[in-house]
Image (cartoon, rainbow, N blue to C red):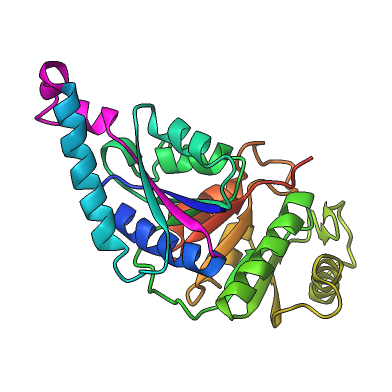
Amino acid sequence: MSEVVVGFDGSEPSQHAVAWAAEEARRRGATLHVVQSWKEPVLAGPTGIDLWTDPGALVREVTESFEAEVAALVVTHPGVEVRTTLIDQPPARGLMDLGAEAEVIVVGARGRGGFAGLGLGSVSNRVARRAPVPVVVVRRNADVAADGPVLAAVDGSECSRHALRWAAIAAAQRGVGLRAVMAWNYLEPQGVHGPGEFRPDYDAHEAERVLSQIVGEVLGDAPAVPVERVTACDLPARAVLERADDASLVVMGRHGASRWSPVELGTTSQQVLHHAEAPVAVIPGPAR
């Protein structure tokens, strides 16, 4: 059976992540797999000495507390199958290993101990950069803007197109519309497959034509959900963030067509991850 894997460390953001993941598992008919790393938070805590005197008892204590917290968080999703795993390895690596075949990995934006926050070098950021499957970073309560559209950032790249397909499926699962947002500028005008060379005749109308062509090529002439097409002469991250206030989910390709973006996680994706209030899904490129 398919799985939604979620990282948990007891912090409030990770609680929101578990609640969001439980609802996502319900939508997908998937098992909710909640993962906690006990080694690092235990060693950092006041009971770390117990690891050396009675490691078995310590693991049992952590496991019982972990399972009780998870049970309380998923009580509103009685139809969802839940499994829990306590891992003895670095949290990011454990999540990526256990989630390698999952439909999606979910993490909180900030945490403590085993699943630390969204700052540079954090577990959330590392998982978003490197996981082989889509990763959703949840910043706040899963109920916020639950009925809002799914926003997809579009730039014509292969990874962005894959993310747009994923976003359309997510919108259909939620019964909401899809908002496709494409930023453009005059120096590197956005083309159907990414930014091109300077064109003095490029304008807002051409940007709208390009976005419509991309959406048509990816989703077909009759998409399964209503699609709102939005273009903006602006920086990509700002274009997305300013149009995400009512979004239930923001969907980004892990790396886009910009020649300035690093390979692992594009600049726009990083900025949106750090500043968006809505959950953000980072989608790797299609498997080759």
Vertical side of 101 occupied by 164: above or below: below
Front residue of 260 and 203: 260
Q: Which quadrant of the structure image shows residue 73?
A: bottom left
Question: In the drawing, does residue 226 fall left or right of residue 118?
Answer: right
Q: Which residue is at 63% across, 47% downward?
A: 254
Does residue 121 appear anywhere in the picture?
no
Residue ID at (24%, 33%):
41
* Foreground of the two, 173 or 213: 173
151 over 129 or under it: above or below: below
Q: Which sits in the foreground, 3 or 104? A: 3
Residue at coordinates 75% horizontally, 48% vertically from top-left? 257
Q: Is residue 25 above or below residue 95?
A: below
Task: Tell me residue 97's x, y (percent).
Answer: 51, 34
Residue situated furthest top in the rendering: 52
Q: Does the magenta stretch include residue 33?
A: yes
Q: Which quadrant of the structure image shows residue 118?
A: top left
For this rendering, which residue is in front, 137 or 20? 20
Residue 176 location, quadrant: bottom right
Residue drawn at (27%, 37%) of the image: 113
Residue 196 visible to an observer of this rendering: yes
Q: How many marks?
A: 0
Q: What stretch is highlighted in magenta?
A: 29-54
Quadrant showing the C terminus: top right
Please provide percent x and percent y for residue 195.
Answer: 81, 53
x, y percentage for residue 190? 80, 59
